[in-house]
Structures are given as C-alpha cells and as structure tokens.
Amino acid sequence: MKKIMIVEDDPKIAEHLREYIEKYGYEVFVADDFENLMGEFRFFQPSLVLLDINLPSFDGYYWCRQVRLESICPVIFISARTGEMDQVMALENGGDDFISKPFHPDIVMAKIRSQLRRAYGEYAAKQEERIIVKEGLKLYLERLELKYKERIVYLAKKEADILEYLMMRHPRIAGREDLLERLWDDQAYVDENTLNVNIARVRKKISEIGIEDAIETVRGAGYRLRITWME
C-alpha cells in the first residue's frame, strides 16, 4: 500500500485531504510536529508528500530541500500562492508538481496517481537496483539500507553517500577533501566538523549491524573502510 504524507497547518484542509485520499485505499499520515517534520518523515517513510508552502517556523521550500537530502519520493506542493515565481520556486527547491488553492480533490488525486505511476509504476524508469557489496557488507542505494548477514540498518542520504564512496575506494583512502567535494556542492559553507559528525553517524549505523571499528581515520589524509570483521 502506498503511503501519503500531508504537511498542512490548516487542520480542516488536512482532514479533508486525508478523508478523500483514504477512500482510494492509500495509507495517510497528517504531520503535526512542524518543528520536527523530518523525524515524522523518517518514521512514516511516505511514498509521496503533499506539502504546503506557508508553514510555522520554516516554509515548505525549506522542508522540501531537507526531504531531497534523504529521498527522491515525489513531492507535490499545495498552496494558496498562485504566482508564477511561487511555482518556479517549488520546482527549483525539489518539488515535482504544484496545486493551487482552492483545489478540487479529484485534481489532487489525479496528480497523486500520476506521480506515483512515474515514480513506482508503469512509467517508472526500468533499471536494476544499485547494490554495492564489500566482504559481505551490502549497501542498497535506492532503499538507503545497509545489510550484513541478517541485520539491516536504515541510512540517511548523506550517510549512504559517505559509505558508498568508502566502499568504492576500498582499500584505498577516501580523502577528506574528496568527500567534502562529493557530498556538498560548496565546501566554503560547510562547517569543518560537519564531515566528522556524519562519519560518526555512519560508524554508529555500522555498529548497529554488529561491525565495530569499520572506518579507520587516517590522520592528515582521510578515512578508509576496514574489513577486519571478516578475519
């Protein structure tokens, strides 16, 4: 069953959408923690997001960019803003479609079905799943899953990117500057501790599937994947 996440701060509109979408057999989650939308996103793992622009704390453009750091699921903006620039901004910030308020629910459903077909169904690009394997460690890039033996852990997009590069470079060192350039478009705006924090998160995720000390820090150079767990 496909899952739809609704991010809308007007309770009446959110409930109206939820009731209508559920009639078509979809599982629906209405977000209510506008300070922690990504936490709710990770918990629910939606197939598609309906996203308003005007939200408390941060706008929909911001949250769409956060989603795109971790997922390629379709995002449809629904907003009372009707200007051409608003629609351009929605697409430029990672959105797939735009619906203006007031809207007819049949239009919403048609666009949801269209985006789901393109992402997962008959119109989806046909290609084999990308999997990187290194000494029994399997990284499923499209699923953002890491598997070792029967244990599985789920990764954030940046964590998967780091691990992909480490596995591709093994047994060579993955240079610190190379990682920064690969993961962030503009290194000048990346805090020097950002990579350290992300590496620590990857180490923790790997330890959760039973592998300790999997990433070696090579002083002055970068990081290297260790395979001592196979010894």
Image: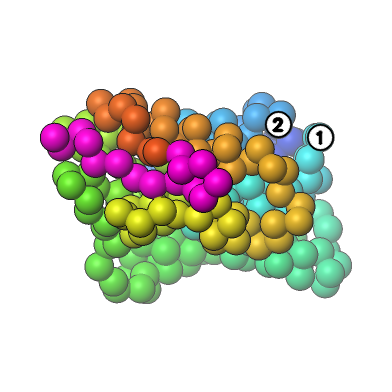
Rendered location of residue 107, percent (x, y) = 59, 62
- Label 1 crowd bin: few (<14), some (14–19), many (20+), radius 10 Å: few
* Residue placed under numbered mark 1 in the picture: 57
User: Who is closer to the viewer here, 47 or 103?
Assistant: 47
| Residue at the far front in the pictured view | 220
Label 1, secondary structure: give it: loop
Task: Tell whether position 92 is magenta.
Answer: no
Residue at the (55%, 31%) spot, across then down: 40
Where 4 falls versus 200 (above or below)? below
Q: Which residue is mark 2?
A: 34
| Left or right: 46 in relation to 6 | left
Q: Amino acid at mark 1?
A: Ser
Q: Are marks 2 and 1 in contact (CB under 8 Å)?
A: yes
Question: How many angstroms separate mark 2 from mark 1 (CA)?
Answer: 7 Å
Q: Residue at x 30, y 54 (%)?
A: 171
Specify start and end residues of the magenta stretch as a single range.
217-231
